[in-house]
Image: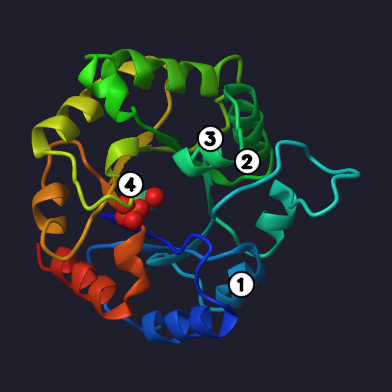
Amino acid sequence: MYVFANLKMNCTDDVVSRYISHFDNFDFSGTEFVLCPSFVSLYRARDILNEHFSICAQNVNNAGAGSFTGEVSASMLASVGVKYCLVGHSERRTLFAETDVHIRQKIEQCLASGIVPVLCVGETKAEKDAGDTCEVLKKQIFSALDGLDLSNLHKLILAYEPVWAIGTGVTASTADIEYAVGVLSDAVRGLGVNCAFLYGGSINTDNFAEISKVRGIDGLLIGGASLDIDKLSSIIKGLNNE
Ligand code: PGA
């Protein structure tokens, strides 16, 4: 089971160091723990990375290199040991005007640098209420992968993150999650890509166990609850025991 801890724009470098020392030598028997700190702290864990502890960037630029002041490329991420990169998180789509074209280009950059993209998809409340979830998810996936050469991709991670569940305290029901994972699996079937599926959106210490057991779910993407190291640790321990 994957546990992605998306720290977003929280945690200065000293706090991230605390996470890293806390989780160095932690018992991750049944899990791969993936810390997603800000760019400036990504390099911190590079000496202790192993099969149970990886690093994920929260974003990447859609170009390979060049005059893009302030931006970070996929090859830069790879050079500090980054294994995964979030792409298309709803906060980036809505707050930073990220389009389907940018998202596809970002995935392409990840592939070129050997980084596993974690493509985040999810519908808004209005889309859910209109019964458009399936259509929205498929459109997000197809436009993100359109025309890409996936033959070198050893893994693609798809995260179902309903926009209405992110940071709201409202979690999708297990039926909603199972339905969405079904839609995502159908969408990628036939692409010949090995996919894993995550759920994200208001996961906490009370609901993680039930969500982790939903059919087809391979991991959790945790935002708010990952800012409390004790809560995060107890979620990982709980998953280890399953
Ligand atoms: P949340 O965030 O757990 O605070 O809802 C999840 C995410 O944005 O990935």
Whether residue 157 sits left or right of residue 128 in the image: it is right
Q: Which residue type does callout 4 highlight?
A: Ile
Whether residue 112 sits left or right of residue 16 in the image: it is right
Q: Position of residue 84 (x, y in %)?
A: 52, 51
Number of disc labels: 4
Q: Is mark 4 within 8 Å of ligand 1?
A: yes
Residue pushed farthest front?
126
Q: Earlier in the sequence, mark 4 or mark 3?
A: 3
Q: Position of residue 155 (x, y in %)?
A: 45, 38
Q: What residue sits right under mark 2 in the picture? A: 110
Give the Cα distance between marks 1 and 4. Answer: 24 Å
How would you rate the neighbour count of disc 1 (Cα within 10 Å): few for under 14, some for 14-19, many for 20 or more? some
Q: What residue sits right under mark 1 in the picture? A: 41
Q: Which residue type does callout 1 highlight?
A: Ser
Q: What residue sits right under mark 3 in the picture? A: 93
Whether residue 188 sits left or right of residue 203 in the image: it is right
Up/down of 162 relative to 27, above or below: above
Q: Which mark is residue 166?
A: 4
Give the Cα distance between marks 4 and 3. Answer: 13 Å
Q: Earlier in the sequence, mark 4 or mark 2?
A: 2
Q: Which residue type does callout 2 highlight?
A: Cys
Q: Which mark is residue 91?
A: none
Up/down of 241 relative to 74, above or below: below
Q: Earlier in the sequence, mark 3 or mark 1?
A: 1
Give the Cα distance between marks 3 and 1. Answer: 23 Å
